[in-house]
Image: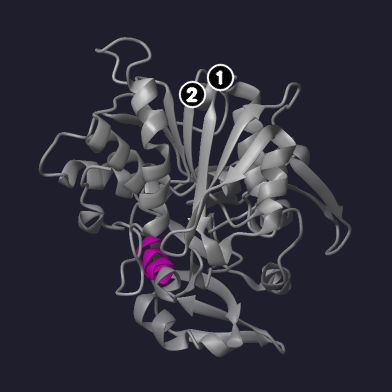
Amino acid sequence: MPEFSFDALRRYPDVEADNLFAADASDRLILDEALGALEAVRGLDGPDAAGRGRVVVIGDGYGALTLGAAAVLDLHGIRVHQDSRAGELALAENARRASDIDLTGRFVNLPLGRELLEGARVVLLQLPRSLAELDDVTRAIAAYADPEVVVFAGGRVKHMTPGMNDVLAESFDRVTATLARQKSRVLVATMPREGVTPAPVRREFHAEPEPGLEVCATGGAFAGTKIDIGTRFLLGSLDAMKPDARTAVDLGCGTGVLSAYLARARPDLRVIATDQSAAAVESARQTMEVNGIRNVEVVQDDALAGFDDGSAELVLLNPPFHQGSTVHAGIALKLFQAAGRVLAPGGELWTVFNSHLAYRAALQRAVGVTRQVDRNAKFTVMVSTKR
């Protein structure tokens, strides 16, 4: 494959650190393995079409696959689905920063579905860790893409499992694996099965805590239809959370469990549930709908970037402790700072986290005076009051 500067890519506005990267060997291998197929579709509709609308990229972390394909093969009209809002912003920023060629108009971001996949002949896919998420993706491809579609699904060997082959085989008649290179491998899927339909949203009713909740989840939502144990512990403090608040934000809302319980307990409270994950946002919207909850607005956003300073009196947060497959505190610190900016003076940030993480000092720096409210063998609940 001709040269493309993967090293010039950045993760910004996502967390950046020496052990976090914007591209890896699996991105390079996917593009190398797909090169012949990409060259074929480039000329499919004539020399001026440049593969327009025939190439789809799914799960591109920060733009390596999209911009690599656009730059090397001069492709246009690439349709892209990234679950992460930070990833979308990073892709756009990396396209703007490209120095040798204008890449800003070469792609469009779309949700997973017909508009993304209809007529696609080549799909470049970074394998998700979740088999449920992979099932959502592969079923959508089989349901909507061209019958001649070829899927190049790659990842790091240490994160790949035989179950991924099985999931692909449920939607495609032929699945093969390439030779490994630099600890990466690509699965190639062709011949989508007839009759495959998009995956339904999963639903599960939880009787506890009372009065119970039906949780909805797409395949990519963290914890699926379960109630994460940290979230369940934080729910025990719901009654103590700033009773005079008029606007509350559920930051990193996941499937919307915290938002739903808070909104039902306080029907006059305006609750905004936000997450950078498209899968989480769709799950939370479905959770509100099936439970008949009307005072929750669900939005996709990266660390409250679209929220005004001092616009909320209450923020709830169960922060992640990893970036992709890497354990890293950077995302939690970013969210603490975001909450501190968005809280009005006297507002409260309620946080639950694994006790060994010892976030008190970081919370005090980002928000204000922080005290422990509850603690068990695994989790700590803290409240921080905005200065």
Q: Which residue is mark 1?
A: 146
On the image, which quarter does residue 21 sit in? bottom left
Which quadrant is the C terminus positioned in?
bottom left
The magenta segment:
334-342
Location of residue 102 in the rendering, given as x and y in whole percent from the top left corner:
15, 34
Helix, strand, or loop for circle 2?
loop
Question: Real-space Cα distance between discs 2 and 1?
Answer: 6 Å
Location of residue 64 in the rendering, given as x and y in whole percent from the top left corner:
33, 48
The residue that appears at 43% across and 80% down in the rendered structure is: 363
* Direction from residue 122 to residue 378 in the image, left or right: right
The residue that appears at 56% across and 52% down in the rendered structure is: 128
On the image, which quarter does residue 15 sit in? bottom left
Outermost residue on the top side: it is 46
The number of numbered badges drawn on the structure is: 2
Tell whether position 339 is magenta: yes
- Mark 1 neighbour density, 10 Å: few (under 14) some (14–19) many (20 or more): some
Q: Is residue 350 above or below residue 250?
A: below
Of mark 2 and mark 1, the one earlier in the sequence is 2
Outermost residue on the left side: it is 100
Location of residue 39 in the rendering, given as x and y in whole percent from the top left corner:
34, 27
Q: Which residue is mark 2?
A: 121
Residue 285 in sight: no
* Direction from residue 341 to residue 369 in the image, left or right: right
Q: Nearer the viewer, residue 325 or 228?
A: 325
Q: Nearer the viewer, residue 311 or 366?
A: 366
Are the residues at dot 2 and dot 1 in contact (C-beta closer than 8 Å)? yes
Location of residue 385 in the rendering, given as x and y in whole percent from the top left corner:
46, 76
Q: Nearer the viewer, residue 156 or 113?
A: 156
* Direction from residue 40 to residue 169 in the image, left or right: right
- Mark 2: amino acid: Arg
Helix, strand, or loop for circle 1?
loop
The residue that appears at 70% across and 34% down in the rendered structure is: 171
